[in-house]
Image (cartoon, coloured by chain):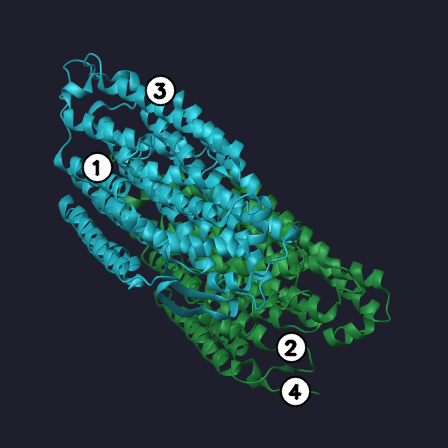
Chain colours: A green, B cyan
Amino acid sequence: MMNEDPTALVPELALLTAAVLGLLLGSWLPRRRQGWVRALAVAACVIGLIATAVAATRPDEMVFGGSYAVDATTHATRAIVLVATLLLLGLSTDTVAGHRRETEYTVLVLLGALGSVLLAGAADLLLLFSAFLLASIPLYALAAWDKADLATEAAMKYYLSGAFAGVTMITGVTVLYGATGATGYAAMREGLSTGPAAAAAVGLVAVLAGLAFKAGAVPAHFWVPDVTDGTPPAVAAVLTTIPKIGALVGAYRLLTTAIPDTVVDWPPLLAVLAAASMTLGNLAAFAQTSLLRLLAYSTISQVGYLLMAIAVASRTPAALPALLFYLAAYAITNIGAFAVVAALPGRTIDAHRGLARRHPMLAVALVICLLGLVGTPPTAVFLGKLTVFAAAIDGGMAWLVVVAIINTAASLFYYLRWIAPVFAATDPEQHEPVVASLWARLTAVTAAAASLVLGVGGGLVFGFLGGTPG
Amino acid sequence: MLSLIVFAPAVVALVLAFLPATTPARVFVGAWIATGLVQLALVVAVWTAMPAVGYGFVERRAWIPSAGISYHLGVDGLSLPLLALTVVVFTATAVFAWRETRRPKAYVTLFLALQAVCCGLFVALDLILFFLFFDLSIVFMYFVIAGWGAGARARAAALKFFLYTFLGSLALLLGFILLFLAAEPHTFDIPTLVAANPLAAGGPYAGLTLLAIGVGLAIKTPTVPFHTWLPPAHTEAPATGSAVLAGVLLKMGTYGFVRIAMPILPASWRQFALAVVIVGVVSVIWGALVALAQTDLKRMIAYTSVNHMGYVLLGVGAAGLVAGSDEQARQLATTGAVTQMVSHGLITGALFLLAGSLHERGHTYQLAAYGGLAARTPRFAGLFAVAAFASLGLPGFSGFIAEFQIFTGALGAAPIPTALAVTGILLTAGLFLLAMQKLLLGPVRIPDAPGSPRPFGDLHPSETIPIAALLALATVIGLAPRFLLDLIEPASRALNELVTR
């Protein structure tokens, strides 16, 4: 079966074309007109979304020699990544407009988004690794985009840990290839029925290490706080959102289609990683006073909840819709929280003191996003958590749900440390009226509203995801 | 109809949110009072048109069908009294807030939102809908305490309240998910779960489910040993917040027992009913004893709430002790428990509003700072005396009707715990009499500001009217309870049939 129909890849090609054209366009346009590149990127995302919607009506298929899956999972990932990219383009408008590297920012985001989609769709280890590189290298550059001291240091850390993760991952790919005699997922599954399981386990752990790096999960999470804190919020929001989506869906696809858990018993490993991510992320977030570091650790703990769905992926059909819905909810809510930070000049909790008086809409958006990250109904993350918890119990991991519940309650503490001063009174003399950036503010309000809409209208989305959670 | 009752305050809140903050405070509070009165009229209409058995005014729409979640509302004899209580307490609170001047726009919109979610909780017939309202009530109450309480201590108390009750709500969610997975097909719908009775066999899974739900509800109720969030939250909240917290939010916990825990998990409920009875009795005694030791009026009232909620647990627990009691006794205990919820809401709401009036004049809740108020402020003294007598269970008030039924119903099944619980009445009588003696009798003593003595006026009409209305209702229920009991009794009979099946 050699299906090489490029029309199956319209969303991916749209991103790629926009990135290449954008780079060329940006080289010729004067600096104040570089907004056209962003318009091009927006157009590419919209085209990609339309193409995804059209493609979703067609039956599932494997394209390009069975190396790339075009199915409901890929469609959902495309939609999540493209919507997230649109929100990120909105969020970053104030930061990058008129900046001397405006085009570079847009192009790098597009390439990163493309890498994330490919990670999710890959059904072959080599494609998975290429997608890993595509989702990594543009984002290393993006981390250094600001060229400030901290950003350079952040990019260096990100690059070094990424390079290490990449080497580990390619080693894992090699070992898995040796153990199974194939790189395509379907063939690997057959190969594993006779091949050495111990070697396959080693290879799998190494590949997962690379994906854990992209997702920012324990134990490959050390870059997250430094990179998030060292880069502008517009960049940090990209780095903590886009690669996670592809990495987690990619891990799900690899584990469920290539590695039967009867051969390599991976669910306990994933469960331990999930518990460690949510716990360590939360514990570290407690003491933070920098908003970006706090959000960074919050994203680590969120990955923990997402990994719960992957841990029970082979045991219950409810895991997939739960994972995808939670990813969508997380992406929107996380971008909303970063947008609030981007909208204001302050980067510490104290700087947001009294925000409710100065910018009531922004304060409400912040509360919705932060309580959304906790998982308060009726926000989208609540539905995500509900379905993930239900899937985890259904998959026989009730202990993990108890850990997650304790962590959720604990996480409320540090989110409230941020929310409480927002509604506190300020000394009017000390604080100048702060001007909030228009586009970031709009993005924050849009994301908060979307989080509520997705939470209330979740029924429609689950209908699209096709599965029954629980 | 029910949707209208639930969402009317939310819509009004949304409209008010678009008015400029400089609009006079009376516009906001006036809109709030009007909303409450409209809701009250609607609830009366619902009450008069209730069917004799089963759920009335059912509304059901698909919401998230693939996850077994639907938008399902309905009222029966267990929920309608509490819905009515919610509307009454909120309307009284709105009138009491007439003179509020601190950020009236945010204040009123927040309370209206809280009003909507409280009404929604009592009519929800879907576990996730129930959970949604349960959680949102915590969020809005947090902002009320943190925003209108007194300073840094209020923020700490609000944080404790949020963390503690949020942990409880997550335990509840765990229990709901366990129920969801136990039912085939999976569903969160309460009537469907009741009919299916998926955990009829009992066993460890059912026991754990009941434990998760029970802990979640016990934290909200609150019972000993999960009550420690309550006193600081009450002490630091504004008077209106305390009245709503005690009058309405605490009922969410006990209502959860009769709506969810008892009918859906009958086997486990019967198995662990004695534990519920014991927790109830410990709450009764402990709450009363600790209340006796308080020197702070508001803390004292807060601990009597623990005491009064203990009676409710005694009642619902006794309903599960099938072996040692006849059907009529169990029904009496359940009816008494529901009546106690209504009664406590009215009386404690009034007591907290009175405490707020006192604080506004004297700026302290310390009992020792006041004395002889009967001579200085006769209206306050009269209402406080009535509320105190009603709260200690004097015949003629609703508390007596409720507690008498609970004791009569529980005595046969659990004689020793019931006898112990009756001593709780003695303790509360003692502590209220002591408080009255300190506050109302003796030489006039009011806290002074440094310098000139502060004017210490009697209650304003905007304070007298809501407090008197709450107490009048408690008296009406105490003297002519049939209109209420006729509604509750069929529902509690149905509930007992579900528990014993």
> Measuring 36% from the left and 66% from the top, which residue is drawn there?
B58
Three-letter code, disc 3 = Thr
- Callout 1 and callout 3 share a chain: yes
- Residue type, mark 2 in image: Tyr
Give the answer, above or below, for where B251 lies relative to B237: below
Judging depth in this view, the residue of B484 and A36 nearest the camera is B484
Q: CA distance from mark 4 to mark 2?
A: 10 Å
Answer yes or no: are tags 4 and 3 on the same subunit: no
Residue A116 at what x, y percent from top left? 57, 66
> Would residue B228 appear left or right of B268 to someone viewing this image?
left
For badge 4, the amino acid type reads: Asn
Question: Secondary structure beneath disc 4?
Answer: loop
Disc 1 secondary structure class = helix
Q: Which residue is mark 1?
A: B467
Q: CA distance from mark 1 to mark 2?
A: 70 Å
Q: For mark 2, what is the residue? A: A68
Q: Which residue is mark 3?
A: B295
Image coordinates of residue B306 in percent, x first then y, are: 42, 34
2 vs 3, front mark: 3
Mark in the foreground, 1 or 4: 1
Residue annotated with mark 4? A3
Tell me, yes or no, whether the two marked residues, 4 and 2, touch with CB atoms within 8 Å. Answer: no
